[in-house]
Image (spheres, helix red, strand yellow):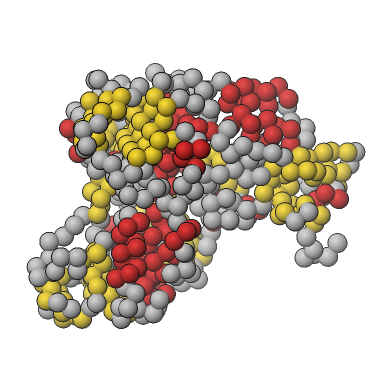
Amino acid sequence: MPANAIADLSSGVALDDLPDGRMLAGKVGGDEVLLIRRGESFFAIGAACTHYHGPLVDGVLAGETIRCPLHHACFDLRTGAPLHAPALDPVPCWRVERLGGMVFVREKLMQDAGSVSAAGAAGAAGAAGADPAAAARRTAGGAGRGAGPGSVVIVGGGAAGLAAALTLRREGYANALSMISADDSAPYDRPNLSKDYLAGSAPEEWMPLRAPEFYADHGIELLLGTRVESLDAGARRVTLADGRRMPFDTLLLATGAEPIRLDIAGAAPGQVCYLRSFSDGRALLARTAGARRVLVLGASFIGLEVAAALRARGIEVDVVGLERVPMQRVLGAELGGFVRDLHASHGVTFHLGSSIAEVRERRVTLTDGTVLQTDCIVAGVGVRANVDLAQAAGLALERGVLVDPFLRTSAPGVFAAGDIARWPDALSGELIRAEHWVLAERQGQTAARNMLGLGERFAAPPFFWSQHYDVAINVVGHAESWDGIDIEGSLAARDCVLRYRRTGRTLAVATIGRDRDSLQAELAMESARSTEGPMR
């Protein structure tokens, strides 16, 4: 077979060509399939991640799971089930048959994305050499989780809320499930708002994470544009702004965060735009449709992603920020300087160490006296965690809603996840809170499993990615401070690993062009964070 030929996996692969730990990409009919060997077991799954279609062959195997190189989604090789966000849908599986010294990939297996037990039965049948007893335990485990609390209420329709709802249904929970969201849009791909959507390359129909009918089809009561006025944790009920009362047996608080809004002298109402919600994104897209020049206030991740998206549309951009080096507090001077130079090379003009003094129509005066003309101002200067509801309910707070390793708050039956949750991090030994999309989803998944009594400690390290033109920066871990940064490779070549260390420990790892290194760092941090023990 020529070196660049695509293997027909249905025609068979010699065992000698598939050593332990090998992944072989090929086709079965018209489908792209990945054949994997783990010991004496063989698996065949879809070749692309169901999140952003990352090539799984470039990912990392860990036990009987595979991780996507792009954004660290994790899938079960036996079932195809999505174990860790950001992927929320399974990859397909095929039946594998071993005959003598050959392995053949047969027919595609039926899967039910909403049922762990159904996916488990299909995946178990698809693994040649699988342990039938283990497969039966997995299948029975999924089917046996349907009891749980009598009713679950999720307050929040973002990353954590949707991930929790999907996980509850996937784990077999069949009782009443309600999701209350102050947003007027059903859950959508929020990270894309400042990336492809604002750049004009992601159409609006790509943004919803589920079709409108999905929620009713899966028994999820979705209340949009609805605010929870109060939470009575003792009586186990929430009161909505319209006066309705909703009882619950278990509740997840996932109220997220809101942009810090500024009072800028002279700015007309609506002249300063923010980007947090889908409606914000639509408004900003419309506002900048005919713009020639936009001022971005804040050299943050969101601010600079907005700058990159606007430059992709040919709009001139000025970035104004108080810091001398963008994101120095989060990334350090070296990587922050690289990001600044990258944007400058794409035509962004920086005004650092400054802020806005006043606005007069399209004329903006900075605190250093610089005068700029702009058609629109976009502010990205940080967010504030929405903890008001938790505070009024008397939950324990400390720079966020305090939770234990199982994401339980101080009130029985009440969990918290996402931007508001402050949890004990086993690696650093500190309480931490982080505002990352993937982290929020993974906390929602863990909280859902613990609502069903599965006793899962939250051990996932924070992870986020940031896209700037053709450069993706992946960051694993959490380091609020460090005493040294080790750099391997070259920032200039866009091929590097940065390790943020304190007292000899690596607390965070940033990578550019080193996806496998990022995945390996995540695995190492998970191992360091994991603590065995029952949920008590």
Q: Residue at x 19, y 65 (%)?
A: 270
Quadrant containing the N terminus is: bottom right
Instruction: Please tell me whether residue 414 is drawn above or below residue 194 in the rendered image.
Output: above
Say whether residue 361 is left or right of residue 470: left
Q: Position of residue 81 (x, y in %)?
A: 59, 39
Q: Is residue 6 visible in the rendered structure shown here?
A: yes
Outermost right residue: 100
Instruction: Please tell me whether residue 199 is drawn above or below residue 441 in the rendered image.
Output: below
Say whether residue 151 is left or right of residue 112: left
* Viewer-proximal residue among 83 and 92: 92
Q: Residue at x 63, y 34 (%)?
A: 119
Quadrant containing the C terminus is: top left
Q: Position of residue 348 (x, y in %)?
A: 33, 77
Instruction: Please tell me whether residue 246 is drawn above or below residue 370 in the rendered image.
Output: above
- Count of marks placed on residues: 0
Q: Position of residue 269 (x, y in %)?
A: 15, 65
* Viewer-proximal residue among 71 and 510: 71
Q: Is residue 357 visible in the rendered structure shown here?
A: no
